[in-house]
Amino acid sequence: MTSPLCLLFDCDGTLVDSEPLLAAEMAISLTRLGLPFQASDYIGEFRGSRFRNIVTVLESRYGSVDPLHLAETESEMRSNLNRRLETELVAITGATEALMALADFPCGVVSNGPENKIQTSLKAIGLSEHFGNNLFSGYTAKCWKPDPQLYLHAAQRMGFEAEDCVAIDDAMVGVKAALDAGMTVIHLNRFPDVEETPEGAIMISSMYQLPTVIGHLLHHRTMDSRLVAYSR
């Protein structure tokens, strides 16, 4: 029987612990461009944001950079990052176990990162088999979180309505995108001392909690559908 719920996962910070590697490479590359940036700036202010959006904010503070130099630096940064992902990347604690427990649900990955980065990350930690070709990149769809269109694009491609999707995301840009798309949103809040979960989203602090939450959602959904059928 086809599952009534589709699970859409963010990648960086939700499935894979890539953000420290990404932040370190950004710090090197952006500083080289003349845009002062520390790894802690990514975690504190820009987590989950598209690289070019970060550049735009920094340019407003420190001045514009040469577009050609920017393109060359970004290309080099992504090559260096992919090499590090292949050898240094680890899964977010509990992500592998959660996916195994939720194997009966259709699952996709929805990320602001390039598709080859998503593929490299999932392959490096052995999670590719859980998603197949259901990888949805902002660079492929030409829209990025917090625009809800990226999540809506993923839902459409997987054959589900927004209300039948559960988005699991750790970053505010992703949580906002999924809420605006009309999806049920689970916020993986790994920094509850400094970050609040937006109204309307369900907070978990560990991926180990995810299967239980999905189970509750499915139970309530099943009960609601039975009540509707009974009332007819």
Image (cartoon, helix red, strand yellow):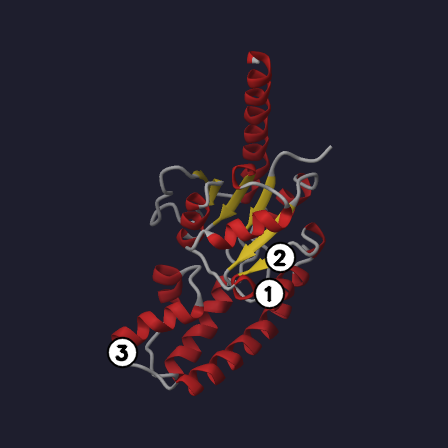
The residue that label 3 is drawn on is 62
Q: Secondary structure at mark 2?
A: strand
Q: Which residue is farthest front?
A: 232
Name the quarter where the N terminus is drawn.
top right
Q: Residues within 10 Å of mark 3 (few under 14, many from 20)?
A: few
- Dot 1 or dot 2, earlier in sequence: 1
Compared across the picture, whether 106 is left or right of 18 comes to: right
Compared across the picture, whether 47 is left or right of 86 comes to: left
Tell me if label 2 and label 3 are in contact, CB under 8 Å: no
Q: Quadrant of residue 187?
A: top left
Q: What's the residue at 54%, 33% (across, down)?
A: 213
- x, y percent for residue 128: 69, 56
- x, y percent for residue 219: 58, 25
- x, y percent for residue 34: 34, 83
Q: Secondary structure at mark 1?
A: helix
Mark carried by residue 135? 2
Which amino acid type is marked by label 1?
Glu
Q: What's the residue at 52%, 80% (across, down)?
A: 75
The residue that label 1 is drawn on is 115
